[in-house]
Image: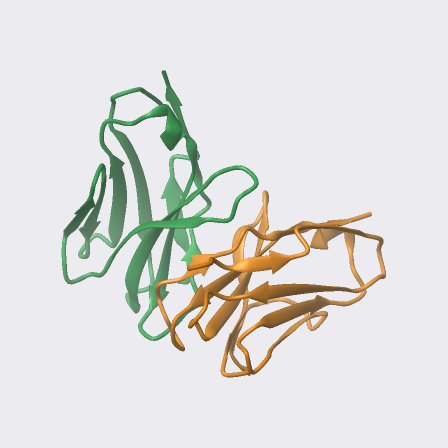
Amino acid sequence: KAGVTQTPRYLIKTRGQQVTLSCSPISGHRSVSWYQQTPGQGLQFLFEYFSETQRNKGNFPGRFSGRQFSNSRSEMNVSTLELGDSALYLCASGRLAGSNEQFFGPGTRLTVL
Amino acid sequence: QQQVKQSPQSLIVQKGGISIINCAYENTAFDYFPWYQQFPGKGPALLIAIRPDVSEKKEGRFTISFNKSAKQFSLHIMDSQPGDSATYFCAASGQGAQKLVFGQGTRLTINP
């Protein structure tokens, strides 16, 4: 069974631009969560989706948004990029809504210049 | 109340020794406590997890000890190997909640 896939793996953007990251969960998994990982703040929860609905949202500004499609694939978007948005963005998949057990993808490394 | 505090920040253990990483939480609504292992350039990998109805869970060389009254849990790696060198994260989540609250991580180095 294939794991969680994330694309692209690396991305370089400049301040003010926007970016879209993609995540495909494990086959059969319907829940997707996103996390931001930085050396200073560690791993922080962004949002959680199930059946195309956002179930939970972390404490991030409105520039961070996401969505989930009917095939469970998910995208997250960051608009008006800031230098502090440079991070590893991780997607995790779970079998059901509120699945405690989550499996992470390799992440997308975003660098904002 | 959402915090999970992890210690130590870094740990060096000799090959064959026991590695111990500790975590403490405040929110009594947490009922799922996983440990993740992360290698450089990779995403965190689920290692082992425990729920509060048991005090210990063992999988191979990895053991979680859980103390509900103290709101603490720890990861023990027996017979530590150089391949175990990685960053380890504890985490916690509540019932029916997918959101994981992570500790700050422990960089473990196993010297050969």
In the visual, does B42 lie left or right of A16?
Answer: left
Q: Residue at x 17, y 56 (%)?
A: B69
Q: Colour of chain B?
A: green
Q: Residue at x 25, y 21 (%)?
A: B16
Q: Residue B68: horizontal and vertical position, in percent?
A: 19, 57
> Please, is residue A10 above or below residue A75 in the view?
above
Q: Residue A57: horizontal and vertical position, in percent?
A: 54, 73
Foreground pick, A80 / B24: A80
Q: Residue at x 37, y 24 (%)?
A: B82
In this orientation, does residue B12 appear? no
Foreground pick, A28 / B7: A28
Quadrant assignment for the C terminus of chain B:
top left
Can you tell which quarter of the image residue A46 is in?
bottom right
User: Which residue is most to the top?
Assistant: B112
Which colour assignment does the render follow?
Answer: by chain
Q: Colour of chain A?
A: orange
Q: Residue A28: horizontal and vertical position, in percent?
A: 42, 72
Q: Residue A79: horizontal and vertical position, in percent?
A: 77, 67
In this orientation, does residue B30 appear? yes
Quadrant assignment for the N terminus of chain B:
bottom left
